[in-house]
Image (cartoon, rainbow, N blue to C red):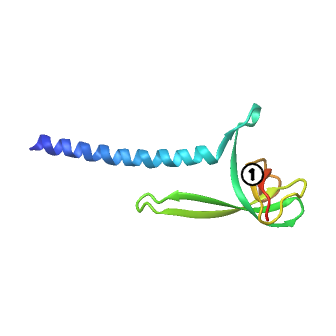
């Protein structure tokens, strides 16, 4: 009997470990797919985000809302969170409603650490 319970406990531990590994790999996959991109030279890795411009009232700066979606560990519900990031727009091309691609950069001001790489879709 003790051997059977030991085997059952071992299988239970393996099953929960597998679930944890699956959750971690899913989270890692999301991060790898949407957050980190390699660049050449000394610059190393820079994060990349896709977002929607919500304000363009500042000169050479836009506020971009970036949505983060993840699955709750215990309940499995998909949770959506949004962060507002200030991004550098050198030519003042982006307007409210544009979908843009951002890349992490050196601090340009007290709160601005992102720059617009390209405008994916213009507002209608």
- Under circle 1, the secondary element is strand
Label 1: which residue?
102
Place of residue 29 in the rendered image (x, y in percent of width and height, measured from the top left): 54, 45
- Residue 90 as seen in the image, left or right of residue 110: right
User: Which image quadrant: the C terminus?
Assistant: bottom right
Place of residue 2 in the rendered image (x, y in percent of width and height, measured from the top left): 11, 43
User: Which image quadrant: the N terminus?
Assistant: top left
Residue drawn at x 36%, y 44% as measured from the top left: 18
- Residue 111 as seen in the image, left or right of residue 91: left
- Residue 67 as seen in the image, left or right of residue 20: right
Residue situated furthest top in the rendering: 41
Place of residue 108 in the rendered image (x, y in percent of width and height, measured from the top left): 83, 53
Viewer-proximal residue among 102 and 104? 102
- Residue 11: quadrant of the picture: top left
Residue drawn at x 18%, y 42% as measured from the top left: 6
Q: Is residue 85 above or below residue 28?
A: below
Residue drawn at x 47%, y 47% as measured from the top left: 24
């Amino acid at each position: 009997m003790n051997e059977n319970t030991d085997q059952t406990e071992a299988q239970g531990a393996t099953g929960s470990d597998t679930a944890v590994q699956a959750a971690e790999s899913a989270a890692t996959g999301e991060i790898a797919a949407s957050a980190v991109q390699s660049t050449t030279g000394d610059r190393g890795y820079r994060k990349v985000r896709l977002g929607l411009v919500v304000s363009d009232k500042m000169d050479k700066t836009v506020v971009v809302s970036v949505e983060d979606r993840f699955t709750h560990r215990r309940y499995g519900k998909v949770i959506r969170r949004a962060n507002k990031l200030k991004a550098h727009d050198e030519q003042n091309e982006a307007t409210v409603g544009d979908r843009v691609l951002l890349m992490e950069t050196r601090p340009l001001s007290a709160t601005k650490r992102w720059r617009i790489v390209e405008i994916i879709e213009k507002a209608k």
